[in-house]
Amino acid sequence: MTPPKTTRGLLADSATVNGYKIGSLAARALPGPLASAAASMIGLTLAAGMRDKREMIELHLKRVNPSLNGFALRQSVQQAFDSYAKYYVESFRLPTMSKRAVEAGFSIEGMENVSNAAAMGNGVILALPHLGGWEWAGRWLIDQGYKMTVVVEPIEPAELFEWFVDLRHKLGMTVVPLGPKVAGAVLKALRANEVVCLLCDRDIERTGIPVEFFGETTTLPAGPATLGLRTGAPVLPVGCYFTDRYNGHHAVVRPAVPANRSGRLRDDVANMTQLLAGELEFLIRRAPEQWHLFQPNWPSDPGY
């Protein structure tokens, strides 16, 4: 049984929720250029106050590019915090933005992979790393008429999680929390030929498939490959990057990961997940400074 929270704990939870709500209101109230400038200031503040996260980002960036050192490494770390802050500011603003405004700065490479997959009728699985402005790409797809279900990690406090769920509902997304009911909800969405988005560069429960990922063994979630093999839904690796243009985003949709049935399902899932790991590496290497992975992700990471 979970012990009841103390008054101090409840007050801290309330302050956290209110902080996000106030930040959201401020982001929407500011003109776009000022909101972008505010995101940069937030990134500087976060980087200055979160030493453990800076060290973790350094480790991850050096996995992507072992030659990063000195000033170049510090600059990339700061860019990761700036990108993370920009992601939040943009997510807060998205529900009130028009379809035209979202479209204006958006470009996409490989959209035919999505349309061709949807034409097959088995649903579409988008497999994403925590990279750039993925919420923006999701909103853009919804504006094109696609129905979307997203699987998200529950966060504490519960009130904050519900607030984020409501934010995504306003974008047109169906939100499914990671947990015992997720499989049924996702299968239902795929049977309805919806797009299902799975962030899959981090194995939260650490029960996934061992893979080589940036030169070191770790695990990645088995979900994308398992769903693809069982349902026939194509698994498309996707990245969405911030660009230098105002409200600029560029999405890259890769061809479907080969879903070959050659033996036991477990072996096929393992083979497909390793292929997906290679695709995630490709997407992340295009802009590693936009990779928002602040948690330990490999067994050698502190705190794993």
Image (cartoon, rainbow, N blue to C red):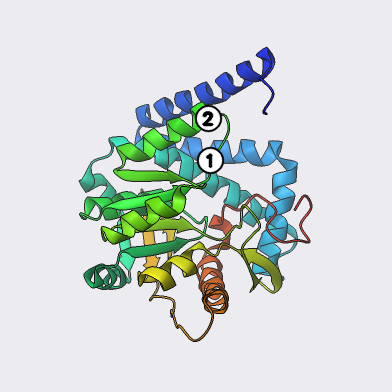
Crowding around mark 2 (Cα neighbors within 10 Å: few <14, some 14 to 19, many 20+) is few
Q: Is residue 233 above or below residue 48?
A: below
x, y (%) of residue 30? 38, 29
Identify the residue under disc 1: 154
Quarter of the view holding residue 197: bottom left
CA–CA distance in space, label 2 to label 1? 8 Å
Q: Is residue 161 above or below residue 204?
A: above
Label placed on residue 76: none
Q: Tell me how many marks there are.
A: 2
Q: Quadrant of the N terminus?
A: top right
Quarter of the view holding residue 163: top left
x, y (%) of residue 140? 29, 52
Identify the residue under disc 2: 158
x, y (%) of residue 262? 49, 86
Q: Are marks 2 and 1 in contact (CB under 8 Å)?
A: yes
Do we see residue 242 in this rendering?
Answer: no
Crowding around mark 1 (Cα neighbors within 10 Å: few <14, some 14 to 19, many 20+) is some
Q: Secondary structure at mark 1?
A: loop
Residue ID at (45%, 50%): 182
Give left or right: position of 13 versus 39: right
Do we see residue 84 in this rendering?
Answer: yes
Residue type for callout 1: Pro
Residue ID at (43%, 29%): 24
Residue type for callout 2: Ala
Name the foreground residue: 72 vs 19. Answer: 19
Residue ID at (75%, 60%): 70
Give left or right: position of 124 versus 84: left
Residue at far bottom of view: 262
Q: Is residue 284 above or below residue 294?
A: below
Q: Secondary structure at mark 2?
A: helix
